[in-house]
Each structure stands twice: as C-alpha cells, then as structure tokens.
Amino acid sequence: MTPAPESAVADRPVLLVTGASSGIGRATVLAAAEQGRHVVLVARGAGPLEETAEECRARGAASALTVPLDVGDDDAVADLVASVLRRHGRLDAVVGCAGVVAYGRTESVPVEVFDAVLRTNLTGSVNLARHVVPVLRRQGAGSLLLVGSVVGHLAVPMMSPYVLSKWGVRALARQLAVENRDRPGVQIGYVAPGGVDTPIYRQAANYAGYAGRPPPPVSSPERAARQVLARLEQPWRPAQLSLANDVLRFGFSFLPLLYDRLVGPAFPVGATDLATRADPGPGNVLTPSEGGNRLRGGYPGAAGRLRANLRLRRRLPDLG
C-alpha cells in the first residue's frame, strides 16, 4: 500500500484522550487510530500507555504520543496542552476519560481516598477544560467531550465519592456549554455510560467489604468508544449511552420514594459480587496500578452472578 503524502498525514485530526491506558479511554484511542488520526495518550502509568500507543501505531494512527501525568495536577495539564500545540499546531478534539472509583459508605472511605477520587474525576476535568477550552476558542473550532456516568444522574449506595464526582462532571459540561455558546464552532459534549466491561471496578478503592462489578446490561468498551467518537462528530446524539440509563434516571427523578426504597436492596444484587470479599484498601486511587490496566475487565454475562447475589442478599440483609 502506498503511504499517504506527508502533508496529508500532517493534516489528519489530532485527538487527545485522558485515561487512555485502560477501558473506554483505551478503546477510544484504538478506534481513533483505525481512523488514521494523530492520537495523544494521557494516563498516570507510562508502561500501559506505551503499550497502548504501540497498538495504535499498528492500527494505523498517523502518530501516537504518550504523556504520563496526573490530570489532578494543573501545571502538568498546562504543559501537556502546550506540548501538543508545539508538536501539531492545533488540537481538534479532547476526550476526558480519566477516572477512579471508591466503594464504601461516605464515612467509611478515608479522607485521602475520598479527596483523590474527586481530584482525578472532577478537578482533573476542570483542569483539562481550563487549558483546552481557550485553545478551541482561539481556533474557533474543536470539541471537548467529558465522560461521565449514569451515577452522575442518580444516588446509589456505597459509591459516594464517585457519585459526587460524576454529578460534578455533568454540571461542568453543562456550564462550559453555556459559557461557550458565543463560539458555534466549539463543541462541549458529555456522555454517560452505564455498565461497561472495564478494569475500573477491580482496580477501585474498596471499603465496602465485597467486590464491585458493572451493573447490567454490561456493554463493551469498544461499543462505548464508538459512541464517544460518534458524538464528537455528531453532537446532537443522545448523551446516555444505554437505554437502561433512561429508566434509572426516570425512577430517580419522577418516582423518588420508590427509587430510594428499591435502590438499597437492588444495588448489591446488580452492581457487586457478594461472593468475593474485598480487603480494605485504596486500589489504584492514590497510585497507578499498571498491572491491572487493560481494555476489558473480564465481566461476562450477568445472569449467573445476579442469581448468586440474590441468594447471598437474602442472607446479608444489612447490605442495603
């Protein structure tokens, strides 16, 4: 196959993705690589980032740049954006996908872990916006897409820091959209995945006593990535990436008493693995866990696990 002229390669879109070493972020850069884009991969761990970048190059990326950093560090994010502009001269799209999870009651999660979840998920998104949006406004074009969660529209037991952070991400996206209405070419987007088969649940901080897992229906990270990239191109697409999200949002908003009554007993059944005990610990919240970073988390069909959880739930009534 004849390679594309150098000028044509240089003109290809530049996409920056945070949380690019694992799960939805990793799937997004791989899918973008297949479209021939320049990709900039950002996450805390250098090893998994470079592994993902090699796969991007093999799949056809115009280029793949890795930048290991913590999105909670504002100076590091400022340097990141500046380095991308020096390298490419522009920034066409940014996907904020970096995220960590902590399980446990609000009072059970240590303060340093609670704060670190907010720092990565919410403050990291603010830092990204602080330095990306001015670039997009100067260009008069480009997209910033923040990846939230269905729990950013709900309240669920045992996930307080994550829920708070994702409510904040949704509010930030809405605020940015209002602030940038005077630049029609600048698109501020938001998507809310439901349950996705990624490693984030295994890597989570855990003070709940049992392992977490994605709630059903469980989607693949590849499908979520396709939806993310489609929304970059077509901002009118629905922000909710699962029909189940809409059912939960309806119950939370319009049937709050029923929702509150049901969510306590239902959450351990649908979004945990009660048969797998979890020792208390910070998981990857305070430091990256490079060995656990991969595309999928290894969560097959939920039917068998739901049945097992139902049996265990009857014996453990205090979980709600």
Image: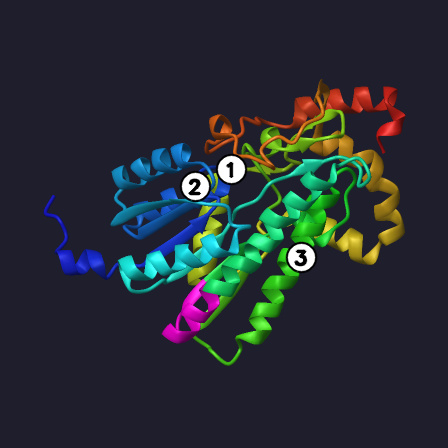
Q: Residues within 10 Å of mark 1 (few under 14, many from 20)?
A: some
137 magenta-colored:
yes
Instruction: Please name the residue shown 89% across and 26% down the image.
Output: 317
Find the distance from the CA under tag 1 to the CA under tag 2: 9 Å
**Which range is magenta?**
132-143
| Element at label 2 | helix
Q: Which residue is situated farthest in the bottom direction here?
A: 182
Specify which label sits upstream in the sequence, 1 or 3: 3
Closer to viewer: mark 3 or mark 2 = 3
Instruction: Please name the residue shown 52% across and 51% down the image.
Output: 73
Find the distance from the CA under tag 1 to the CA under tag 3: 25 Å
Q: Circle 1 sits on which residue?
A: 220
Find the distance from the CA under tag 3 to the CA under tag 2: 24 Å
Of 249 and 80, nearer the camera is 80
Q: Circle 2 sits on which residue?
A: 27
Q: Circle 3 sits on which residue?
A: 168
> What type is the residue that disc 1 sits on?
Ser
164 magenta-colored:
no
Q: Residues within 10 Å of mark 3 (few under 14, many from 20)?
A: many
Tag 1–tag 2 contact (CB < 8 Å): yes
> What type is the residue that disc 2 sits on?
Ala
Specify which label sits upstream in the sequence, 3 or 2: 2
The image shows residue 258 at horizontal and vertical percentages of 87, 48
Of 148 and 282, nearer the camera is 282
Of 221 and 119, nearer the camera is 119
